[in-house]
Amino acid sequence: MSRETSAHWGTYLVDVSADGREVVAARPHADDPDASPAIGNVVDAHRHRSRVAKPSVRRGWLDRGPGPDTRRGDPDEAYVEVDWDTALDLLAGELDRVRSEFGNAAIFGGSYGWGSAGRLHHAQGQLHRFLNAIGGYTRSVNDYSRGASTVLLPHLIGPRAALDLRSKPASWTDIAEHTDLLVSFGGVRRSNTWVVPGGHARHVGSELAREVGRTTRVVTLSAQRDDAFADLGAEWVGVMPATDTAVMLALIHVLVVDGLADEAFLAAHAVGADEVRRYVLGEADGVPKTPEWAARLSLVPAEVIRDLAHRMAAGRTLVNVVYALQRGERGEQAIFAGLTLAAFLGQLGLPGGGFAHGFGSMGDYGVGVAGPPLPTFPQGRNPVPDFIPCARITDLLLRPGEEIPYDGGRLRFPDTRLAYWAGGNPFHHHQDLRRLRRGLARLDTFVVHETHWTPTARHADVVLPVASTLEREDVAAGAGDSRLRAMPRVVPPHGEAREELWIYSGLARRLGVDFAEGLDSRRWLERIYETWRAAPSSPPAPPFAEFWRDGGVDLPGIPYRDTVFAAFRADPVGHPLDTPSGRVELFSPTLAGFGLPDVAGHAQWREPTQWWGSPQAAEFDLHLLCNQPTHRLHSQLDMGAASRSTKVAGREPVRLHPTDAAARGVADGDVVLVRSAQGSLLAGVVVTDALLPGVASMHTGAWFDPSAPEIADCVNGNVNVLTRDVGTSTLTQATSGAHVLVSVTRYDGPLPPVRAYDPPPLEPR
């Protein structure tokens, strides 16, 4: 018996045992042209020993009550399995204590994560609805994917165009038809096209990209040669990490000096070109941003930069800056400089030309279909005004009452007593795990909903087992999708796991509020579907019963033609941007007026601490890139077969250039100790010439394993023990975890076992 289900990495089929209780196989649809290998993790993960079977309470919290505790996350800390009534009574009492004694701002419910692709059982949405019902919570804003650009771009192109740049960019089809040269700063990775928030019915981005490879010249500037689709046939320009901004500024310098800048476009559609011109010519600081200057920083030969500038000016060119470039110290400068470069070329708003921010970063980017709004589960209103940028979670926990600058203003950190996490794993997304653990130790109470004993669950005081995507009903679709899909329950819940709707309903009753309005999951699905169906913006759709019987409804795939900047280019007076000037602000008086020490009114080269030219590189002499994994989504189902197939010596691999491997006396399959100023890990070695010398790379998402601290902070290769917990800037306060300076040495000691996928010691009450 087969059932269809969906995840953020796509729609696939699950084969179930004859008794309907076990998952025996998972496979892609035969007509999915490029299914994600993450499907191969499903079977192993479903009944893995790391599943949470019963509500569990950390022994230390149960015995001593709420309060700070440095034993949170200790691998040998025991948990007591309790019944649901006991767990809900304890948690409801603690929530009531915190809100009564400290106010609802003392509850942090940001709960960043990618737990479920469903439109109803969206873990964050359900948690937020519950916390809103009991009086609110401190929230988080922005994301770890593009947190810097989310803050920066509205200042440069206006909020409306910033949204359109995400939802209505030039499409892959536009590029294939109109673009002569696609220049991507950062790679156009195939594996990232498998992932879409909400999932897609079929993966279409890969084939669209292949068509571009048949018609368009592609240049990728990256420290990794294999950071782009092989089918794109891309020309690789090796650039050292964190130096892309310098290359962009040098390209602008060539356009200015050689008379290639589109002065008419700049005069009609932009403000601040004169300030940029003075800066790149060196009139502002005495340092001309020549190709020779950029070559000394980036190690890209000056003649390559000069030639590329002329090629970009000779035809229709699209400048793409991937998300990863802004996930680093000074990360917003790459976005600022990339947009400025595109403006000097004068092609913003032309079909297949101008600026893009997302090709190779997300599977729905550039598919050419915006699609209708989708069904949503209402969350209510949060009466608590306090918020943090999501990447400042550890600062929130460690610095109560302190203030930080953010987007030209000031944010004050509330005194957080309880954190509630559902559907996410900060031990994947967040940086400097030593520091994060110190922050979690300061809480009175940490609550986690989980399917598995993840590193986050292993740090919680109260762990509630939730039904997985396969164990509940839902509906799914992603932006620009071709179908809104029914997600029937495939198998019964594991152990005593429950749907979160049931959990929050039980908590709400104990706290004297209503959560579910008397509806169960099936009736909520019907309500949100019928509300969506009745909306004027929705396409024709059958009643819910027919939709569920048929397994879904097709969505109209009407290509959008009003791409970002098109109307503005045609008539900048009649269709101005919603910036203060109505134009693209290459110099922003607003940003300049903030008076920040690390962000000026125009794009600049600002030397970071994490790059090959830093004094720190004397000790930490390799620049580690922290990439998204290919065989799992983030840290999800890391114990699965597909994810395990990528491991080396039973742990996450580190890629080294042959020159760097030889200098350290290591070869394929060896185990190494990787250190940074923040921490250390063990990793297995893969030697490849697909990297620049001096550069290493690892995937993010290995489950954190602190079980042998005398050897390394993580013996399973979680890169976030190495990365720095420092905001990109005082403007954006986003994550800077995409790369870090490290040292690598051969490890010849006894190899500790990996305990990351084992449950903690469990005791009956």
Image (cartoon, rainbow, N blue to C red):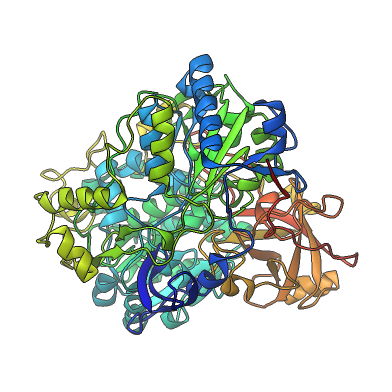
* Side of 628 relative to 608 (left or right): left
Residue lying at the far right in this picture: please name it: 749
Which of 489 and 192 lies nearest the eye of the viewer? 489
Q: Is residue 284 visible?
A: no
Which of 614 and 192 lies nearest the eye of the viewer? 192
Q: Quadrant of the N terminus?
A: bottom left
Residue 466, position in %: x, y? 49, 50
Q: Is residue 464 visible?
A: yes
**Rendered view: 670 above or below 626:** below
Residue 105, position in %: x, y? 47, 23
The residue that appears at 27% across and 67% down in the rendered structure is: 171
**Rendered view: 30 above or below 315:** below
Residue 229, position in %: x, y? 46, 77
Residue lying at the far top in this picture: please name it: 101
The residue that appears at 71% across and 30% down in the rendered structure is: 63
Q: Quadrant of the C terminus?
A: top right
The residue that appears at 27% across and 65% down in the rendered structure is: 485
Q: Determine which quarter of the picture holds residue 360.
A: bottom left
Which of 244 and 290 lies nearest the eye of the viewer? 244
* Side of 548 relative to 285 (left or right): left
**Rendered view: 194 above or below 688:** above
Residue 460, position in %: x, y? 62, 40
Q: Determine which quarter of the picture holds residue 175.
A: bottom left
